[in-house]
Image (spheres, helix red, strand yellow):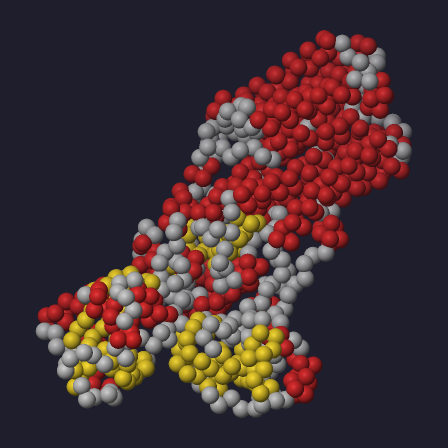
Amino acid sequence: METGLGLTSEEAKQRQGQYGRNVLPEKPPPGSLSLLLQQLKNPLIYVLLAAGIVTVVIGHFSDATIIFLAVVINTVLGFVQEQKASNALHALKSYVTNQVTVIRDGERRTLNTEDLVPGDTVILDQGVKIPADGMLLHANRLFVDESLLTGESVSVKKDTENMVFMGTTIAAGQAVMLVQKIGSETKMGAIARQIQETEEDTPLQRQLRGFSRQLVLVIAVLITIVFLAGIRYRFGITEIFVTSVALAVSSIPEGLIVSLTVVLAIGMQKILKRRGLVRKLSAAETLGGVTVICVDKTGTLTQGKMKVADCIGDEKELAKQVLLANDLDDPIVISAFEWGRTKIRDFVSEHPRLDSIPFSSKERLFTSLHSWPGKSNRLFVNGAPEILLAWTTLPQNKKQEFMSVIDDMTRQGKRLIGFARKEMPKGRITIDYADAKKDLTWVGLLAFSDPVRPGVKQALELAKEAGIRTVVITGDYAKTSEYVLSELGIKVEEHEVITGDRLEELGEEELARLVRRIRLFARTTPDQKLKIVKALKKNGEVAAMMGDGVNDAPALHEADIGIAVGEATDVAKESADLVLLDSNFATIVGAIEEGRAMFENIRKIILYLMSDAFAEIIVVFGGIVSGLPLPLTAVQILWINLVSDGFPNLALTIDPPKTGIMKEKPRPAGERLVNRWMMTLIGVVSAVAGLMALLSFVVVYKTSGDVVLARSVAFITLGLNSLVYVFSVRALMTPFWKNHLFENRWLTVAVAAGLALQVLPFTTPAFRQFFGLSSLDNRYWLAAIGLSVLMFFVVEIFKFVYHLKYNDVPLK
């Protein structure tokens, strides 16, 4: 091959100074300090820190200790989990070979790919990954696998002056290329830059942020009311200020922040056990809200490999022909060759090739002449079956029969190669196209398909049961994709299909309208995949995009959940939120199940802790407006929230999913984290529990005049209450007798531990002094236990009554 002299070393050095190194843009991993600070970016944390600082200033060091403990636990848990995820899949890895052969100073040299510069002359052989974008100076039967960029498994024939692109692979042939673009200026570099953009918040992050802001607003209003009420009732400024801080502390469920972090972290670990790697903590739960999964057919639904699917004709004769008449210059004929080797022994050496004409896209055939025993040699012709049939000696009715078979198979999306042969005079050792275009003997045909991935059909059926819509977005032909979907049990109607050409004509509004019913997008480009995902999100869908190639990266990045299969390119993995380590499509269904369980557990925790927190508000506020001393001190409130209730709410983070969770429809995308029935239940539980504790305080204080004793009774009543009604709360709106009351063994252990911790402050004089408590006799303990059991049945009665009034929350 003529290669020229290439660049000189001096020219290459100058150009490297001008253009830089041939590396893809890469976002550095977040540093430890950055990850640590991210854990503090939460309005609830801000309020806790402010409350902690104030309590230090006014000298309430015991309160401050527990407040800052809550912040530290949350920060450490979040930091450890996100650092693990970051380290597991960090760094955008380039799709270039480590070394490449170039012409420098008129000589062949081996260089690291990162040292290439525009103007370099590169030698490309079969199997080599192209190290940059450039133009072909020479091409010899060159076929390039561009599935990395286009998603299609069929290699593309390239000729001199055609463009080739970084990261694609030489499937067959040899070539010389002139490097024109390197690094971030290449097509792959453009995709890499696109996925470096700032990521959007997940739906859960948005809801938690909104919930936190609402909670902060409620706290601010309540503190203002208390402060004004205190002045109205002529409390001292210092005293009412301390009271306001106590109320702020009681309003914030300190354990909520810790528990939300833990539920997501544990969810990530559960998904990992099911062979799915979640790359970001907050994305774990979002899986549970997925309403539509967008999949790329090639390499996602299928294996991305052409295989012989059907054989029409004599297998032995076809096997002989694919072994002899084969240049092995395209994946489809390589696949045919491998098939032939499984049918007969390799006997190529017995029939040497005398002459051949390479495959031509214009003539649509390949032909070769071989030495054969007897009085003649044999000419083999391979090509488009409908063309070869016309040149055979078959009767017309037989030709029609084969044409019907060909039509059926192409409608099924299969690629076909026809095979024919002809006896040639012994003296002939050269051939031309005219020899192949008449008097042929029909041998048969091979049909090739890209096989469906194992387990995909069952996984799609499970997704359908879960109310999740599947949309196929592919660069392949519509008929091919329709057949693949039919193999997966998905029937696609004509009005549910749209092609890239039509898609290009649609505006954003029209696409957003059509995307509600379209199930198959065919002949699409990577930009159009991105456009489709944006349209789905505009309709309020929680979109998951599955893919494996560089071409999928922008859409993976844009989707609420990007999912990459195990064999995906590193660029796709870097863009994804979830990586399927076993490339099993069913793993996504398992991950969605865990995501749904996480969301339910988050709701259980919020319901439990907010009920507890607002019960404390009622106790504190009731004491103030009644003109009584504070029924609970800040340290007592924090002990109940963070320690006594801490174990049960942490046990709720691993509460097993309820039966049939994957037979329910996805929750509405716009549904609030804390919806109507939750707010109502929080109101009922907190009101009843708060009034029970407040009345206990009032009765004991009025009868004994001992504020410490009265606080001790209120403290134990409120603490035991929450340890009992947690068993009702964990079932959400399901009656406790239908939900296996003690199914979560860890919750049972946690309640026992919480009970022990609730009793602990009463055990020694030092503890009683620290917490401001006094010893209690049995009658107070029995009264607290009785009220707690009553509280449990109050919650169950509420579920029943609410179900009778509203149908949106069925008792299951």
Q: Please give the name of the residue rendered at 50% of the width and 55% of the height, measured from the top-left corner.
A: 566
Image position, residue 755 (x, y; %): 69, 21
* Figure quadrant of residue 157: bottom left
Q: Quadrant of residue 763?
A: top right
**Residue at horizontal 48%, vertical 67%?**
148
Q: Position of residue 158 (x, y in %)?
A: 42, 80
665 vs 360, nearest the viewer: 360
Locate residue 236 relative to residue 164 in the image: left or right: right
Q: From the viewer's side, name the closer residue of 586 and 142.
A: 142
Write down the quadrant of residue 30 in the picture.
bottom right
Q: Height in image: 182 above or below 191?
A: below
Q: Is residue 218 above or below residue 180?
A: above
Lateral position of residue 452 relative to residue 226, left or right: left
Residue 157 visible, this angle: yes
- Observer-nearest residue: 460 or 430? 430
Q: Residue at x 60, y 68 (%)?
A: 193
Q: Say if 593 sits above or below 30 in the image.
A: above
